[in-house]
Image (cartoon, rainbow, N blue to C red):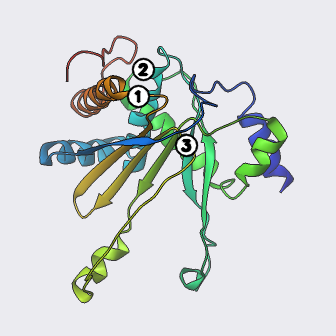
C-alpha cells in the first residue's frame, strides 16, 4: 500500500548501516550460547516487569552488540517478521511467510530497561507494515541491509505434538547473505542463541572477542536493567 511505502521510505531515511556492510561474504563461523536457568528466570521476570515480549529483550541485546562493534553508534539492523495471513485456515497455506525488514531506534533511552521498552514499541509499530517487501525498500533507496540480521524463533506448537511423533533422522543446514546474524530459539524453557559471523569480515580472534561482548551484554541487561547504557562497559573479559 502507499501508506506502507511512505512509512518505510521515512523509516530508512538517514539510517546508519554497519561498517562492514557490502563486504564480500566468503564463509561463516558459528557461536552457540544457552541461557542458564538463573538467566532464564531473570529474563522472564524482566519481560513481565517491563510488560514486553521476550523477543524485545533479545533484539535489544542484538542492537547493543552492534553498537559496541560500531564504536557506540546506533545503527540499523534487520529483523525477521512473520507475514502469514491472519485468517482462518492460514496455517494450512504452503509458503515462506517471512520478511526481513530494516529496524532501528533512536538514542533516547538511557537505561537498558528503557531501551527494551523502546524496541518493543517499535516492533509493535512496524507490525502493521511488516508485509511490505524488503526488495522494494532496497530498490527504491539503494541501501544494502545485509550487514546484520536478528531472528527470534518460538515454535511453541511443537511442544504440543512432540510426544506424538518420532523423528528417526534429521539434518539441518541454513545460510543467508547476511554477514552477522543473531538467532534466538526458544524451546520449552530453554533459550538457545546462535551468532553466525562471516569469517571474511570477522577473523577468529575478533569472533572470540565478540562472543565475550555478547556474554557481557546479556549479563548486564539481565542483572542490571536500570543500568546506564552510556557508562556500561562490555569489553572487559567475560
> Residue 42's spot in the image, x, y percent?
21, 42
Give the residue number, with chain letter if any, for mark 1: 65
Quarter residue 62 falls in: top left
Would you place residue 170 above or below residue 186 in this image? below
Distance of label 1 from label 2 (alpha carbons) = 5 Å
> Residue 81's spot in the image, x, y percent?
56, 56
Secondary structure found at label 2: helix
Image quarter in which the N terminus is found: bottom right
Give the mark toward the camera: 3 or 2. Answer: 3
Image quarter in which the C terminus is found: top left
Distance of label 3 from label 2 (alpha carbons) = 18 Å
Contact? badges 1 and 3 (CB < 8 Å): no
Residue 53 visible at all: no
Would you place residue 50 above or below residue 215 in this image? below
Determine the residue positioned at 30% across, 19% down.
234
Determine the residue positioned at 23% across, 31% down.
219
Q: Residue furthest top?
A: 231
Q: Earlier in the sequence, mark 3 or mark 2?
A: 2
Total numbered circles: 3
Contact? badges 1 and 2 (CB < 8 Å): yes
Characterize the local packing of mark 2: few (<14), some (14-19) or many (20 or more) Cα atoms within 10 angstroms. Answer: some
Characterize the local packing of mark 3: few (<14), some (14-19) or many (20 or more) Cα atoms within 10 angstroms. Answer: many
Distance of label 1 from label 3 (alpha carbons) = 16 Å
131 and 98: which is toward the camera: 98
Give the residue number, with chain letter if any, for mark 3: 178
Determine the residue positioned at 22% across, 59% down.
189
Secondary structure found at label 3: loop
Q: Which mark is residue 68?
A: 2
Amino acid at each position: 500500500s502507499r501508506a506502507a511505502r511512505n512509512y518505510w521510505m521515512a523509516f530508512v531515511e538517514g539510517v546508519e548501516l554497519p561498517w562492514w556492510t557490502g563486504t564480500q561474504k566468503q564463509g561463516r563461523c558459528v557461536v552457540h550460547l544457552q541461557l542458564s536457568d538463573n538467566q532464564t528466570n531473570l529474563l522472564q521476570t524482566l519481560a513481565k516487569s517491563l510488560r514486553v515480549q521476550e523477543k524485545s529483550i533479545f533484539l535489544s541485546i542484538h542492537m547493543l552488540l552492534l553498537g559496541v562493534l560500531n564504536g557506540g553508534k546506533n545503527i540499523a539492523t534487520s529483523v525477521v517478521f512473520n507475514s502469514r495471513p491472519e485468517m482462518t485456515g492460514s496455517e494450512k497455506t504452503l509458503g515462506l511467510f517471512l520478511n526481513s525488514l530494516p529496524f532501528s531506534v533512536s538514542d533516547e533511552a538511557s537505561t537498558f530497561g528503557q531501551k527494551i521498552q523502546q524496541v518493543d514499541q517499535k516492533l509493535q509499530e512496524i507490525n502493521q507494515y511488516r508485509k511490505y517487501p524488503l526488495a522494494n525498500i532496497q530498490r527504491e533507496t539503494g541501501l544494502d541491509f545485509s550487514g546484520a540480521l536478528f531472528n527470534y524463533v518460538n515454535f511453541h506448537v511443537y511442544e504440543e505434538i512432540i510426544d506424538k511423533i518420532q523423528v528417526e533422522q534429521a539434518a539441518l543446514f541454513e545460510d543467508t547473505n547476511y554477514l552477522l546474524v543473531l538467532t534466538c530459539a526458544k524451546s520449552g524453557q530453554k533459550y538457545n542463541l546462535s551468532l553466525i559471523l562471516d569469517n571474511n569480515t570477522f577473523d577468529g580472534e575478533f569472533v572470540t572477542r565478540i562472543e565475550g561482548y555478547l556474554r557481557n551484554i546479556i549479563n548486564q541487561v539481565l542483572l542490571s536493567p536500570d543500568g546506564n547504557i552510556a557508562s556500561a562497559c562490555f569489553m572487559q573479559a567475560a
